[in-house]
Amino acid sequence: MRAVQCSFCGTAAFYRREYEGVSLCQKCFKRSIEDKVRVTISEHKMFGPRDHIAVAVSGGKDSLSLLSILSKLKTKFPLSKLTAITIDEGIQGYGDEAISLAKAMAESLNIEHRIFSFRELFQVTLDEIVKRQTKLAPCSYCGVLRRRALEKAARTIGAGKIASGHNLDDEVQTALLNILHGGVERLARTGPVLVDPEQRFIPRVKPLCGLYEREIALYGYLTGIEFQRIPCPHRNRALRNDVRDVLNALEEKHPGLKHTAYSSKLKLGDLLGDRKIRLNSCKICGEWTGRDLCEVCKILVQNQKLECLTREA
Ligand code: SF4
Ligand SMILES: [Zn+2]
Ligand SMILES: [Zn+2]
């Protein structure tokens, strides 16, 4: 039987991309992934030629692949600058591996790497918070603090953009979770590019938003990227895992479905886009928030209260 040929160069194919109806050899697969990122960046006008970009690198396959691809694309934009940022949440037995992988990757690409910790920024670690606060899932506390940590980190290094490694699967799962949790208005605040017209926040971009998670993993494997394998001990994303399974099963039967779901999410976001939320400055930290206290300060205040109660007991 004749081996399946790459649809682009005619050599032996190793991967079938059902949603495009093409077969790819390893070389054309890698190039296609880098091309897709380039197209996403240009379609959404994510970067300018002189941008200083803070790349959020967690040590996972997505963010390490993002750093590697952006460093290749940067050769065409010599006046731009990349800085890799890793946030150390203070999770015992997890953070060290992530930091060393991020550091090694940045070093190999000759990119400056900076580490910012919850301890240094908020005087508390995630482990300490989740020991005291159990109202929400650990990932909810982590997400709020990490967003602020990235914003502070980017301001500190003088970056004008924050790039993160969110992929197509993440984006579609999050959209569906927002709907399931009743937070449909969030669809307007989770696009591939988030820019605050009043410039209170540093713009955030997601150059991998058009890529399937499994294709990024394959890209990482083919390019020899070593990524974190230890799971976070706080990871308990029961509903997200169910949503992921459902979406994967649908994609298997109907190739391309995640792409159409994502474009529907973007259209819905546009329709909701005009609903502006009035922001005030937080009474404690001065950052912008829709309420009196920002989410970060709420977590930190609650943490201090619980810490005092523990001491008194
Ligand atoms: S799994 Fe949750 S708690 Fe752990 S690093 Fe990720 S967001 Fe944070
Ligand atoms: Zn080929
Ligand atoms: Zn605050």
Image: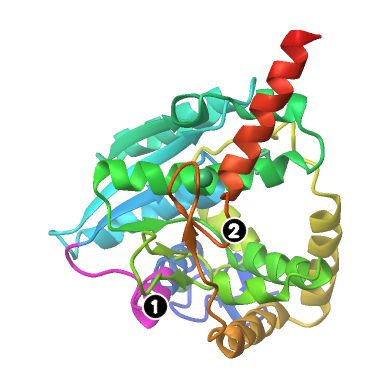
x and y, in percent, of residue 198 in the image: 35, 71
The image quadrant that residue 270 belongs to is bottom right
Q: Is residue 47 magenta?
A: yes
Residue type, label 2: Arg
- Name the residue that disc number 2 marks: 291
Q: How far apart in space, not on screen, are marks 2 and 1 (Cα)?
A: 38 Å
Magenta range is 37-50
Mark 2 vs 1, N-terminal side = 1
Mark 2 Cα within 10 Å, few/some/many (few <14, many 20+)?
Answer: few
Can residue 274 be seen by looking at this rendering?
yes
Mark 1 Cα within 10 Å, few/some/many (few <14, many 20+)?
Answer: some
Residue type, label 1: Val
x and y, in percent, of residue 94 in the image: 62, 26
Q: Going 53% across and 73% down the picture, which residue do you hit? A: 191
x and y, in percent, of residue 91 in the image: 63, 26
x and y, in percent, of residue 291 in the image: 59, 58
- Name the residue that disc number 1 marks: 39
Q: Nearer the viewer, mark 2 or mark 1?
A: 2
Foreground pick, 75 / 31: 75
Say what secondary structure mark 1 lies in. helix
Q: Going 60% across and 88% down the picture, which residue do you hit? A: 267
Q: Is residue 103 left or right of residue 263?
A: left
Question: Cβ(mark 2) to ligand 3 < 8 Å?
Answer: no
The image quadrant that residue 138 belongs to is top right
Q: Is residue 28 left or right of residue 214?
A: left
